[in-house]
Amino acid sequence: MGSDSDSEDDHLGRRGGDGNFELKDFSHREHDSRDQDSGGSDEEEKRPEFGKHRRGSSSTAQSFMLYTPDEERSVIKKFDRRLVLFVAFLYMLSFLDRSNIGNARIAGLSEDLDLSSLQYEWLLRAFYITTVSICVASWGLIASLQSVAFSFPSLLVLRAALGIGEAAFVGVPFFMSFFYKRDELAFRTGLFISAAPLATSFASSLAWAITKIGTKIPIASWRLLFLLEGFPSIIVSVFVFLYIPDNPQSARYLTPRERRVAKLRLRKEKEGHEKGSKQNGLKWGEIAQTLVDPKSYLTAAMFFCANVAFSSLPVFLPTIIEEMGYTALQSQALSAPPYLVSFFTVLATAYLSDHFSTRSSFVIFHALLAASGYALMAIAGSLHLTPHIRYIGVYPASMGFFSVVTILITWTINNQDSDSKKGTGVAMLNYIGQLGPLVGVHLYPESEGPFYVKGMGVCAGFMGAVAVLAFALRVILERKNRRAAGEERKEEGEDEGLVREGRMRRESKRFVFML
């Protein structure tokens, strides 16, 4: 597709007297520039409705693309509605099923199964041990089966199986990079990740209602909680095959023309790396490069630190609030507001990160925000201050670590210049990063309640480390960009007489790391 990108603007069309941009028919296009997998035929693109009188902006011709901004917006909106929101809904169900064990604990789980603090930690650890290794109907069934657990070993096995069922979600942001540009990905990842705090707030509110119902019927509240929150996933899984395409060209809800536009709009980000490459599928050389790339380990280390907080607070918060002096029902209700605020914070952060095309600034800010929240809870606990002050600290903590996780995942994908490197980078991010929860689940043993000063302090330290590592990675990427720009000028023999257009054309082909 890259071979004709520089000449298309001469043949796109002209601006008519009515202010609309009239595109000429695409039938003159060479056969080798057509998408064989786009779902459309040559005859379809020769039709008048595919080639003439499309509304566009004055930047259409300058973009070297074969479609109007209105066409691109239409494709993006369809992906947002049909793909991102549906995947976010699945993740909401997933997070609902994984985090409701915290609500179940204060609804009578520990008493009925006679669980010690160590055994509860093992229930949390089992999920994360399996989630780093293997995907969608299974988790709903397994989550529901938790309601019939009769002992610690049976519930432990079900939690481990739940981790296997939900493991596929670690690859969703990478999957979405096949549909969105680099500067569009953070907001869509934000829509996806924000389902986690939304699910947690929903879980807390729902848990409050279910717990109240459980007191009126002869079924333990925690069993009813697992059953009612797990079963919907089984029903929704039926629609996964219909709503989630493998790639833009297999999206059933796009017209043939829209499938072509969906692929064309991403070609400028791919052609610089893939031009002249005849190898398809995984490129083992690129995988090896990613495995020894320091920036892969820096982002993975940040993800590890963030996951210590990301994994621990949602499953322990109801218990922490209860030990502040509130009843079980009050604790369920008070767990919801911080996560609802976090939901909107994640969306706003992701949108601004895309708008300003920067990642590190938002990672640093929100890591420090989360660290301040944990520090406030730790200090308030050590000084035995009022529970209200400790509860206030939950807000910046949750707002911060949910936003950090969102931007970190996107940053990892943004700074790899091929699909093989992106996939390897995401795999490393999760294999290393998902070890963080194994630390996080040990931070709040009953013996350190009700203040959990050490756990809060440890989380504050880890989130502070994220800010330091993010700054270090930004410095490294800035140096790489400057070095690449300097080498390019040297190779081209650039002088003061070089025309601006030529400089811009070379820069567009050079991969630039997003800071």
Image (cartoon, helix red, strand yellow):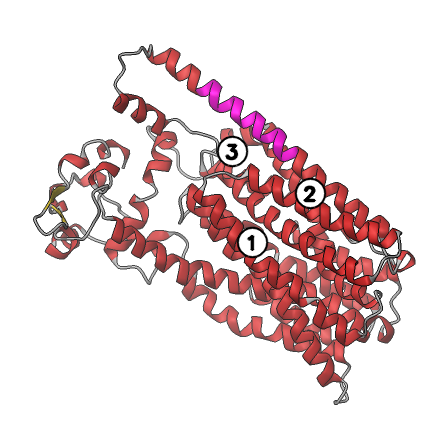
Earlier along the polypeptide chain: callout 3 or callout 1? 1
> Toward the viewer: 219 or 411?
411
- In the rendered image, residue 316, in percent from the top left (x then y), is placed at 77, 61
Label 1 environment density (alpha carbons within 10 Å; few <14, some 14–19, many ≥20):
many
Q: Which residue is mark 2?
A: 304
Residue 101 vertical position relative to residue 344 in the rendered view, above or below: below
Q: Is residue 43 left or right of residue 372?
A: left
Label 3 environment density (alpha carbons within 10 Å; few <14, some 14–19, many ≥20):
many
Mark 3 is on which residue type?
Leu
- In the rendered image, residue 449, in percent from the top left (x then y), is placed at 88, 59
Q: Is residue 456 left or right of residue 177?
A: right
Mark 1 is on which residue type?
Val
Q: Is residue 95 magenta?
A: no
Residue 465 vertical position relative to residue 338 in the rendered view, above or below: above
> Toward the viewer: 422 or 246?
422
Q: CA distance from mark 3 to mark 1?
A: 19 Å
Which region of the structure is painted magenta? 469-484
Residue lying at 70% horizontally and 43% vertically, measured from the top left: 463
Q: Is residue 476 magenta?
A: yes
Q: CA distance from mark 1 to mark 2?
A: 19 Å
Q: CA distance from mark 2 to mark 3?
A: 20 Å
- In the rendered image, residue 478, in percent from the top left (x then y), is placed at 52, 25
Is the stretch drawn in magenta largely helix, strand or loop?
helix
Q: Secondary structure at mark 2?
A: helix
The N terminus lies in which quarter of the figure?
A: top left
Q: Secondary structure at mark 3?
A: loop
